[in-house]
Image (spheres, rainbow, N blue to C red):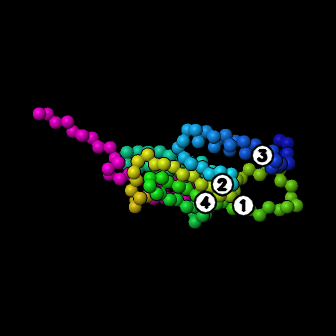
Amino acid sequence: MTLVKFNPNTDLFRLEKSMNHLFDNVFGGYHTCDDENCNWMPAVDINETENEIAITADIPGMDKEDIKVVVHENTLTLKGERTSEKKEYNTKYYRLERLTGAFYRSFKLPAVVDADKIKANYVNGVLKIVLPKVEAAKPKEIAIGVK
């Protein structure tokens, strides 16, 4: 493997980020922020069962106190900021791939959730949020009677 000196002027990540942002805006599902306000976005899995919605986000290298989770008007928002390690200016960097800075992700929830029963757990860089549905949002089977 050949080491190539890092050059921020030819950063291909910016192109990938722009393409992801384009597809996200076209296909919907969540809101992101622009380059001025955010530097990265955590990867997220969202799944739904009859009783709850579960969201799992990869947010390594942060303290749980630096992550904010807010549910308001059926929208879940994740935000925070991962700080970078102090860089040595007299050191040559060959690769800088670990993203730092602010992040913000917002998701419209597919069902009404019970905000008082939401649970969040952050272990080994993975944030797991369980959002129980309110009783009215759960499917109900209707019995068919005979007349």
Q: Which residue is mark 4?
A: 80
Q: Residues within 10 Å of mark 1 (few under 14, many from 20)?
A: few
| SS class, disc 2 | loop
The residue where tag 3 is placed is 11
| Residue farthest toward the left in the current orientation of the protein | 147
Q: Secondary structure at mark 1?
A: loop
Q: Is residue 87 visible?
A: yes
**Answer yes or no: do the residues labelled 2 and 3 have beta carbons within 8 Å?**
no
Q: Is residue 39 visible?
A: no
**Identity of the residue drawn at 37% across and 48% down:** 51
Q: Earlier in the sequence, mark 2 or mark 3?
A: 3
The reply to whether the C-beta atoms of the residues labelled 1 and 4 are less than 8 Å apart is: no
Q: Position of residue 54 (x, y in %)?
A: 47, 50
Q: Is residue 1 left or right of residue 34?
A: right
Res 14 → quadrant: top right
Q: Amino acid at mark 3?
A: Asp
Check contact, mark 3 vs mark 4: CB within 8 A: no
Q: Which mark is residue 38?
A: 2
Callouts 1 and 3 close, C-beta under 8 Å: no
Up/down of 126 relative to 66, above or below:
above
Residue 60 location in percent, x, y? Answer: 63, 56
Asked if the magenta segment contains residue 45, the reply would be no
- Residue drawn at x 54%, y 46% is 30
Give me the C-alpha separation between circle 1 and circle 3.
18 Å
Q: Amino acid at mark 1?
A: Ser
**Number of the label disc, if any, that sits on residue 84:** 1
SS class, disc 3: loop
